[in-house]
Amino acid sequence: MAVLLGLLTALDFGTADFLGGLAARRSPAGAVVAGAQVTSAVAGLLLLAVFWPGLPSGHDVELSVAGGAFNMLALGALFRGLAMGRMSVVAPIAAAVGAVLPVIWGMGFGERPSALALVGVAVAVIAVVLIARGPEAEPTHEGSRLEELALSVGAGVGFGIAFLFFSETSHGAGYWPATLSRAAGAALAIGTLALLRRPMLAHRSDRSAVAGSGVFDATGMGFLLLATHVGGSLRSIVAPVASLYPASTVLLARLLLKERITGHQVAGLTLAGIGLMLIAVG
């Protein structure tokens, strides 16, 4: 059951990223982020009715809001990267950087990760280099490739920082951190768009994809929450499987968008999966 929940989590998060990136190819990325965050927050409120843990503490609220702000910024970079670049490159790099950052941060504050986790970090770094190499004949300007890499790494850093905030919330907070973070992200995105006088709504043809991205994001968090009760140990059983969520983004991009994947990118994707699993297990 734990492995199944991990696979469902990975499928949901990967699909959410794909749909958000797809919508951002035609609609403004800011509007896509805002819409997805609003949908995810609303879906999260419905999930709270099922997984009601009581009211959160003030400290949990502060951490959730801070994590939500960084998660929103990371989503903006991710959706922009998925829209202008190759999904088979952007999603795995963002995931690898997001997994490596908390390990490096913890080491800076005296934590001593296991040997497996450190090997996973090294493998993930190698994977990023391999994945970032595009097809030799790809007609892409160097500037756009650098932007693709910068957005991927920026998204990963944002997700890593958000994870650090979420990891400090209390275990009894239940689904509150996820819902509060999405609500905070939605408020920040809408406020920023209003201040900059940018469009707040995605194009009509993209709104179903935006809503789908938010729903899959919320249900992914729901499966993670359920796994903590059914799976027994999120870190040792579910997390390694759930960390493979970029695979579903890459697969959807390959099947639906016909993105090319080179041999060294396949090797990089494989190493990214191994590295993420080692970090999660370690």
Image: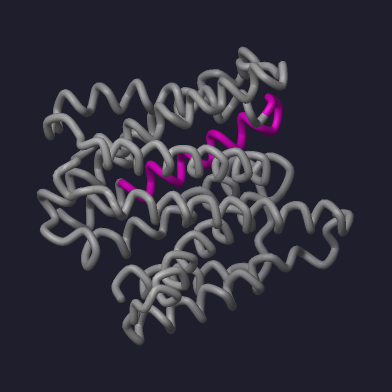
State the image coordinates of residue 102 (x, y, percent, origin top left).
Answer: 43, 65
Q: In this view, does 13 lie to the left or right of 191?
A: left
Q: Nearer the viewer, residue 187 or 136?
A: 187
Q: Residue furthest front?
A: 58
Tell me the residue at 32%/61% (across/down): 241
Q: Which of 48 and 24 is in front in this view?
A: 48
Tell me the residue at 32%/83% (across/down): 114
Tell me the residue at 34%/77% (across/down): 111
Q: Considering only vertical position in the picture, is 262 above or below 35? A: below
Q: In this view, does 194 lie to the left or right of 101?
A: right
Q: Considering only vertical position in the picture, is 124 above or below 21? A: below
Q: Is residue 270 left or right of residue 220?
A: right
State the image coordinates of residue 20 (x, y, percent, origin top left).
Answer: 55, 34
Q: Is residue 24 magenta?
A: yes
Magenta range is 9-28
Q: Does the magenta stretch include residue 20?
A: yes
State the image coordinates of residue 51 (x, y, percent, origin top left).
Answer: 15, 33
Q: Nearer the viewer, residue 187 or 33?
A: 187
